[in-house]
Amino acid sequence: MTDRHYLIGVDIGGTKIEAVLLDAAHAVVASHRVPARRGGDNVVADVVALAREVAGERLADVTRIGIGTPGRVDSATGRIANVVNLDIDTLDLGALVSERLGGVPVHVDNDVNAAAVGAANVLCGDDVSGTIVFLNFGTGLAAGILIDGVLQHGSSGAAGEIGHVPVDPNRLPCPCGQRGCLETVCSGASVARLWPTEDGVPPMPDLIAKARGGNADAVRVLGMVTHAIVDTVQIAAQSVDPRMIIFGGGMAKTGQPLLDVTADELHRREATCPFLKGLDLVSRIRLAPADAPLGAIGAALA
């Protein structure tokens, strides 16, 4: 017998699947990643193999496995659906992984929710009290909301789907069927469409640099993007009044320049709105750590 208890977290992405093993203090003691393979059978096999890889001889001491995945997730049953990038229509992911690993409990959650838990724990340590919002500026745009460390799913699991609030004045068409969704302007994919670059150059840092250099097109596009970013911040802040707003996702890797242009837009709005100025939203915004496996860590802890 042993009094050691471990958690496994698995982050399923469109191109890779990553797993971590956490000890009783929630420190990462092992990690591994593999390229993602399409199809439900392959995903289950890869998750099981990764869990065995990171646990090694400690698999019998694993008390729970958490999985973060894109698509629609029923966190109560572990069933996932509509994971388009991996050719999954529906899959009882939680039950299948649990069965193949000897019945260890498996919890499945949305990947943004998992990243929210991971980011909050990495940035805040043991103090995840109050309300924390994680804004994922990735391929799409969504939020993860924690209240006293507990994820908020809503009655149908749609809590945090902030990217499909249709308030952007540019009224660009969205694949969801609406026009003007925030996701059409300030997600990572939308910035890449609005400001295409070559040779793998990340679009957001390039856009900011060109705008600061006086490029008129860049100034115009950056204005669109930052307007939508701050709309997103305000919707989150004025809905649940979080003590911390964490920027994550691929666009957050822009780093301090992203915080600077966001602060500039917030200050412009505060100049004519004492209410907004009183909220001091700039002081609440943080960047998610760029080098931590937040999705896998959060999946283990969610």
Image: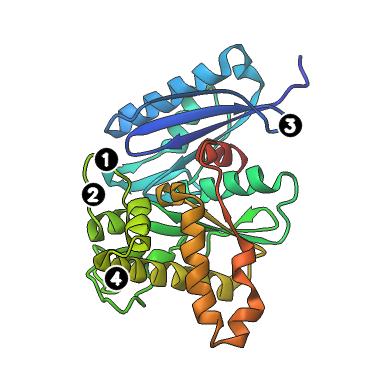
Quarter of the image holding residue 270?
Answer: bottom right
Number of marks in picture = 4
The residue under label 2 is 197
**Gap in angstroms between the C-alphas marked 3 and 1:** 39 Å
In this orientation, does residue 142 appear? yes
Q: How crowded is mark 4: few (under 14 residues within 10 Å), some or many (20 or more)?
A: few
Q: Nearer the viewer, mark 1 or mark 4?
A: 4
The residue under label 1 is 200
Circle 2: residue type: Thr
| Lower sequence index among marks 4 and 3 | 3
| Residue at 52% across, 36% down | 291
User: Which of the image's four quarters has the C terminus?
Assistant: top right
Callouts 1 and 2 close, C-beta under 8 Å: yes
**Gap in angstroms between the C-alphas marked 1 and 2:** 7 Å
Circle 1: residue type: Gly
Circle 3: residue type: Ala
